[in-house]
Amino acid sequence: MKQNFKKRGQKLAKRWENFSQKASEGSKEHIQENFIGRLQNAKRVRLLILEWCLLIVVIVSLALTQAFWYDQSYSKEVHIGGGAYIEGTIGKVNSLNPLFAVTNSEKALSKLMFARLATVDYSGHIGLGLAASVVPDETGKVWTVTLKDDLRWSDGEPITIEDVLYTVNVTKDTSINTSYSTNFSGVKVAATDDTITFTLPTAYVDFPSTLDMPILPAHILADVQPSMLLEHSFSTNPVTSGAFTFNATQSNATSSSDSEKIIYLAANENYYRGKPMLNSFAIHTYDDSSQIIDGLSSGEITATAELSMADGTLSTELVNRRQTTIANGVYAFLNTTSPALENVAVRQAIQKGIDMQAILEHLDGEDALQYPILSTEIELGEYPALPDYDFAAAKAEIANEASVKELSLATINTGYFPELIEEFADQLTKLGFTVETEIYEPGQEFLRDVVRQRAYDILIYEVELGPNPDLFAYYHSSQATTSGLNLSNYYNSLVDDLILSARTTMNEEARAAKYESFLRHWVNDVPAIGIYQASLTYYYHKNARAFSEDNRLVYATDRFEDVDYWAVNRAKRNRTP
C-alpha cells in the first residue's frame, strides 16, 4: 500500500517537473519573440509609448492630488495633550514660597503653582479665581468673599476659608516682609464656615485687586512661626493649588553658574479649572539674556518672556515672536526735591524742551505713553493737553530759572533704557545742563542704593500701573519714603486729597472726574514725563501653543492665565462634518 502511494507521488512530481520545464521554455520563447525580438520596432511607436507614459504620470498625479485634497479638506493638524514645556527666565530661585517671590523666575513659578482668590482675566480686568464671589457693602468698606465648591490642594486636601485667613494674617505679620505686606494694613478679617469678611479702614473701590495674591495651605503651615517660613520644607517642596505642582529641582551640570537651575513641575490633577493639557512645565533659570538666546536657538528651552525687541531677532526659523502690551509704563521721574529740579518752572521747561518724537525713534514699535493713567483702565472725558515741543523757549526759561544746572540721570541696563538715557542726556545738554549718566545692573543693590535713597535727579524706570488706576503708590506724598514708590518725591496736598477721594468713590463717573483733576495737576507740576507703554515680547517655538493673542495682559505673569490650554504636541484629526 505504501509502495503504491510512493509510486503515485513520484509520477505526479515527474509530471509537474515536465510541466514547469515546458512552461519556462514557452515563456522564454514568448518573451524572445514578442518583447526582445520587437524592441527594434520601438522607434516606430516611440510617440505612442511617450503618450502612454505621460498618461500614466497624469493619472498618478491626479490620484496624489485627490488624496492630498481629501486629507486637507477632511482633516487638520491640532494641538493635543501631553509633552513638556520649558520656559527660560532670568533670576535666582531662592524660595518656592510665593509670598517671597522677587525675581522673574520666582514670580513665574508662583503664578504656575498657586491660584489666587481674584485674578486678571482675558479682558485685562480683575475677575474671580478661587473666589466664587467678592461683594462689597453699600459703603465700599466691607467686602465679603466666598470660595468655589470642591477646591483642593495638590495633595488632595480641601482649600478652605481657613487657608485664606491664615495667608492674610501671615502677610500682616510684622516679623516678615513680603510682596503683599501692605495689602491688608489696617484691615480687619473675620471668617465663618462659608465666607471671609474684610473690613477696611476706609472705602476702597479697587479692593478686589488686592486679592490677586497666592494662598498658602494652613493644614501644613498653621503651626509654623512666620519668621521661620523661609526655612520650612514648604519653601523647597510646596503643596500647590495652581495648574502645576512641584516635581524636582536640578542644577545644570554644564553651567559654570550656581544659580542656573531647572525646576520641574507636573500637571496638577486637582487644579480647579481642570488638569492642564501639558504633562509637565519647567522653569530654566539663567543669569542673562545672552544665555537665553542660546538656549532658545538650540532648542534647550521652548519659550521665553525675558527678551525685548532691543535684544534683536533670533537667528532661527523655528521661533515665533509675539509682542503684547502690558499695563506697565516707562517714565522719566523728576526728583522734585533735588536742588536742580525743585523749581516747578525748570521742570516745565524740561518737559517743553524734550523732543519726545526723537526719543520714540529709538523704540521699535512701542506705544507712546503721555500720562500715568492708561485709557484701558478707566474712561476719562478729557485728558489735559501737554505743552508743545519748543526748544528755543525751553532753553531760555532754563537759563533764567535754573539756579543749579548739574543733573544726574540714572537707569538700569536692560531693554531700551541705555539708549533712552543717552538720548535724554544729549537733549538736556543742548538745553544748557551739565549731565552725568549712570547705568546700573538691575537687582537689590540698585533698589537699595539708588531707588530707595532717591540718589538721582532724573530716573528712567518702568513701573506697574495695574488693572485699575490707583495713583497712591507713585504720587501720594506719604509714599515719598525709602520704602515707598513715590519716585519723584512729589508733594501736592490737593493731589493727595484727589487720590484718596478717587480710591473711596464707588461711582465711576465721579472717580473719572477726580482723575481728570489729578491729571491737570500732574501735567502742570511735572513730577514725571511719560515715555512709552511697556510690552511683553514672547519668543516661542513654532510647534508650541502659548497664551492666546486675544488676552489683554496687565502683568507679565498674566501670560500664564490660560496655561491649562498650552500645548507642544500636534496630531492629525478628522474635521467634524
Image (spheres, rainbow, N blue to C red):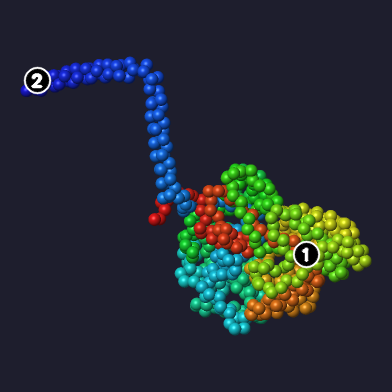
Q: Residue furthest bottom?
A: 138
* Vertical order, 30 against 241 (above or below): above
Left or right, 521 with reference to 248:
right
- Tell me the amino acid under the disc marked 1: Ile
Of marks 1 and 2, which one's residue comes earlier in the chain? 2
**Image vertical order of residue 304 relative to residue 146, above or below:** above
Q: Which residue is mark 2?
A: 3
- Label 1 belongs to which residue? 529
The answer to whether residue 125 is above or below residue 71 is: below
Task: Report the quarter where the C terminus lies.
Answer: bottom left
User: For the residue labelled by badge 1, is the local secondary structure a helix, a strand or a loop?
Assistant: strand
Q: CA distance from mark 1 to mark 2?
A: 116 Å
Q: Position of residue 65 (x, y in %)?
A: 43, 41
Closer to us: 418 or 246: 418
Mark count = 2
Query: Which mark is in front, 1 or 2?
Result: 1
User: Residue 546's quadrant in the figure?
Assistant: bottom right
- The residue that appears at 19% across and 19% down in the rendered structure is 19
- Residue 458 coordinates in the image, percent (x, y): 81, 62
Looking at the rendering, which quadrant does residue 38 occupy?
top left
Residue at the image point whose x is 81% and y is 59% from the top: 355
